[in-house]
Amino acid sequence: MKDNTALLTKKARDGDARAFGELYSKFSGEMYRYALYSLGSVEAAQDAVQDTALEAWKSINRLRNEEAAKAWFFKILSHCCKHILREKYSADTASLDFCAEIPTSDSGEKILLGLDLLRLINKLSQEEKDIVLLSAVCGCNSKEIAKITALPAATVRSKLSRSLKKLRSELKKGGN
């Protein structure tokens, strides 16, 4: 099956709301999971994804590279999440009550992520956390993450490696 992202992006830029909806739907599940892990709150994640959709629709005409739609959506989402964290939450007090079951696909497949691992992820710097979540939760590669974070791809790879090493080390120590 051929990826129709470029065609949908072009149509959306031309004002086709249905094409924008399809384009948004392609990434909405991953965006929600990223926001959920980033913000630690179901309500805040829903707000961030909704804000992203509105901002993306308002500025779709600025997206020049049709193949970069996923990175573009996540860049907007990243900014929305950071805004919500600055305005409403502190990283230390964000609720982690959502961690029981998190949907990973439309087929109903679920993953379980322990509270300890979520707390460890929240100990990372915001940049490290963003890179780990974009890689592990959203499946973005280093080039996509580089576009989202405005870092060179090589820097993304090294920061991801160091962040994962930190997490492994903390898990071995017991995470406290």
Image (tube, rainbow, N blue to C red):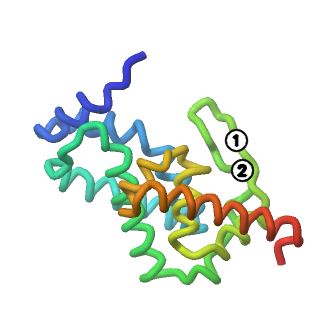
**Residue 136 at x, y = what percent?**
61, 50
Say which residue appears at 60% left-offset and 67% top-offset.
40
Graded by Cα atoms within 10 Å as few (under 14), some (14 to 19) or many (20 or more), the crowding at tag 2 reads: few
Residue 148, percent from left and from top: 38, 57
- Report whether 7 appears left or right of 129: left
The circle on residue 110 is 1
Q: Quadrant of the N terminus?
A: top left
Residue 68 image offset from top left, x and y in percent: 31, 43
Residue 64, quarter of picture:
top left
Query: Do labels 1 and 2 touch, CB within 8 Å?
Result: yes
Identify residue for label 2: 101
Mark 2 lies on a secondary structure that is loop
Of all residues, the one furthest to the top in this rendering is 1
Where is residue 56? Give x, y as percent.
26, 53
Q: First in sequence, mark 1 or 2: give its number.
A: 2
Q: Amino acid at mark 2?
A: Glu
Picture quadrant of residue 41: bottom right
Q: Which mark is residue 123?
A: none
Name the residue nearer the viewer: 39 or 141.
141
